[in-house]
Amino acid sequence: MKQIIFFLILIFFAGCSAISYNANQGKLDKNQKIAVDVFSNYTETPMAGYRAASIMDAALLQRGFKSNPMYSMVSDESSNVEISLMERIKKAKNTGVSLLATGEVIEWRYKTGIDGEPAVSLVIRVYDTQTAEVIFSSTGSKNGLGYSSIGLVANDVINGMLP
């Protein structure tokens, strides 16, 4: 009887956290230098695009990529001028980078309600700076338990999305 109750509690808590990934597993070469650009922020959370880019840069370094965090250089934070994707790819190429990683932050918040669970949804795209073609793309979403932080959930999502 105790085993059944334990199993039901385990299923209940597993159901409280959802995670979903979808990836176009293109080949990323660890010998190529990759730049991480700021993610477009489609949320109401300020600086979510910079936060996602910072976590992605660290995740790439952990995987052995030669990462070059360009989110402060490629995107001009001091002015409110949008830099087009093609201009960002060209800037990355001019600095000797072979790949440019960027994406979109779709959700980055704590849900409202009693439990206030963190929720993160992201899109990652990696572009070849020579051809400006997408060579890798992935989407991921996750909501954590009430005691989790958004940073922890975002780290899980990004690590689950990368090859």
Image: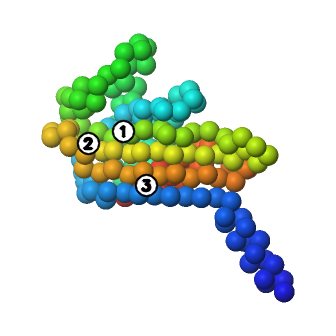
Residue 131: in sight, yes or no?
A: yes
Q: Quarter of the image holding residue 39?
A: top left
The CA span between labels 2 and 1 is: 8 Å
Residue at (79% x, 46% y) in the render: 114
Contact between marks 2 and 1 (CB within 8 A): the answer is: yes
Disc sitting over residue 46 in the figure: none
Position of 86 with respect to 151 (left or right) is left
| Residue type at tag 1 | Thr
Q: Earlier in the sequence, mark 1 or mark 3?
A: 1
| Residue type at tag 3 | Met
Q: Which residue in the structure is indicated by mark 3?
A: 161
Q: Which residue in the structure is indicated by mark 1?
A: 102
Residue 32, image x, y percentages: 24, 47
The correct choice, above or below, for 106 with respect to 10 in the image is: above
Within 10 angstroms of label 3, few (less than 14), some, or many (20 or more) residues? many
Q: Which residue in the structure is indicated by mark 2?
A: 127
